[in-house]
Amino acid sequence: MSTLVDAVKTVRYRAGRMIVAMQSGVEIRFPVSDNPRLVKGTPRQLNHVEVSPFGLHWPDLDEDLSFRGLLEGDYGQGHPGGAAYKRRPEARRAAVAESRTKYG
């Protein structure tokens, strides 16, 4: 398992998405609707996030997501049949590229 080289600046929930801002300016965005545990969370629960070198943890929702998985388009509960695996590979690559935007 590899650790994160970049550092997390902020993690916040906004308009149905989690937004992870990194110190480098990279943002990782993903919809909570693709995760069966996160979709049930309130804004308060979704904003209560613990950060580790490996990923994110929502203690109120008993959910953990790795940075590696997020960058690969796996937004949780990632098993065959899950939302991330149903995407065509080219659509998945586009979603990952969209999440790796730089600040202007």
Image: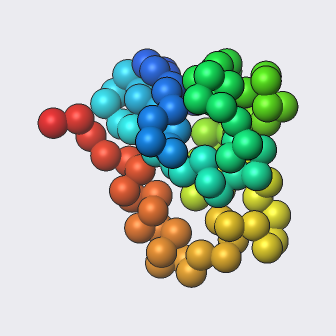
Q: Quadrant of the N terminus?
A: top right
- Which quarter of the figure has residue 82? bottom right
Taking the image as drawn, is residue 54 in sight?
A: no
31 to 60, vertically: above or below: below
For the point 51% across and 45% down, which residue is it? 16
How was this image coloured?
rainbow
Q: Residue furthest left?
A: 104
Q: Is residue 26 left or right of residue 56?
A: left
- Which quarter of the figure has residue 60? top right
99 to 103, vertically: above or below: below
**Pick the front one: 22 or 45:** 45
Q: Is residue 14 left or right of residue 24?
A: right
**Pick the front one: 82 or 36:** 36
On the image, the x and y values in percent for residue 40 come to: 73, 43
Q: Quadrant of the C terminus?
A: top left
- Which quarter of the figure has residue 74? bottom right
Q: Residue furthest front?
A: 42
On the image, the x and y values in percent for residue 88 come to: 56, 80
For the point 49% across and 27% down, which residue is it? 12
